[in-house]
Amino acid sequence: MSKPFTEAKFFACSQSTELAEKIAAHYGATLGNIITSTYSDGEFQPSFEESVRGSRVFIIGSTHPNSDHLMEMLLMLDAAKRASARHITAVLPYYGWARQDRKDKPRVPIAAKLIAKMLETAGATRIITMDLHADQIQGFFEKPVDHLFASTIFLPYLQKLNLENLTIASPDMGGSKRAYAYSKALTSDVVICYKQRAKANVISHMELIGDVTGKNVVLVDDMVDTAGTLTKAADLMIERGALSVRAICTHPILSGTAYERIENSKLEELIVTDSIPLKQESKKIKVVSCAQLFASVMTKVHHNKSISSEFVM
């Protein structure tokens, strides 16, 4: 006779409290109580204010900079491990530091691998994340990784727009696989932007591979940081005859002058998830929640059911 499932418990890192509340509500639960004590020098200590012994614990928190967000996740994982939680799942809607997934020049770290090791050492027995910057980051872990795709929620949104002459675009060569997957699902054409960088976050040159004349274009990317690539690509496509340009980006990092760039660009709309909370509102930015997707996967994980049906591409 199989043992009954213990109740799953949900806890939120401070940077993802709003999303965690939505996930727990979709699951049919409430967030557990955590108290964080902070010292005058900035050091902090999270404390579970309820027993987690023998439970499956979901700790929800994106690890976008600053590094306190990552540190909070690590401390909570360690606390759950030392409190004898049976299963500890780190739910990272956005996996930070993922752009450092290889050595692109001598004497640099592979931060994405380092973070994977830190999460496992802290106590994570499973990872759930969404739209990693590079698929191979899954291989940095020795524990199971459920890598979800935001296309599950973006594709229905695009289909409802009923755009004629739709063309999917990748803002760079690295995102061409993602763009082709969207185009296959939507039976549309694909164009690709080729860019050269002077340095990180600075584009020196951009060219367009493909024809966008008379097309409604949707740019697809995993994240938007400074919005320099997206806005430059949108302006270039309008110059080349596109009727409209929208962008879909899973993770709205939106640092520096990103909001100003988006407002002043030819982008008609930027569609993002709530994996990272927006710093400010914008009439051009549409947020589509990923809470139901995560809640559905977490339900199946807790009951040891297949999650294959959650993958659109």
Image: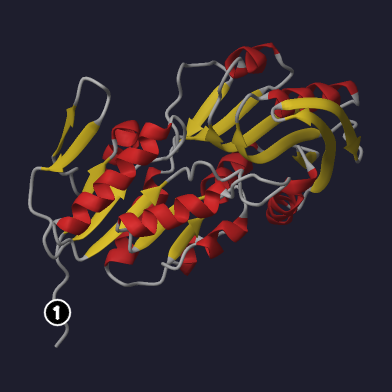
Q: Say if 164 sits above or below 57 in the image.
A: above
**Residue shown at the point (57%, 32%) measured from the top left:** 271
Q: Say if 71 sits above or below 260 in the image.
A: below
**Residue shown at the point (62%, 36%) measured from the top left:** 248
Quarter holding the C terminus?
bottom right
The image quarter containing residue 181 is bottom right
Image location of residue 172, percent across then percent down: 77, 40
Q: In this view, does 86 lie to the left or right of 244?
A: left
Which secondary structure lies at badge 1? loop
Q: In this view, does 156 lie to the left or right of 30?
A: right
Image location of residue 141, percent across then percent down: 47, 63
Q: Is residue 225 left or right of residue 147?
A: right
Q: What amino acid type should be assigned to the residue bearing mark 1? A: Lys
**Seen from this angle, which residue lies furthest front?**
107
Seen from the viewer's position, the closer of residues 26 and 146 is 146
Query: What residue sits right under mark 1 in the picture?
Result: 3
**Residue shown at the point (16%, 44%) measured from the top left:** 32
Q: In this view, does 113 lie to the left or right of 237?
A: left
Image location of residue 23, percent across then percent down: 31, 45
Q: Is residue 87 visible?
A: yes
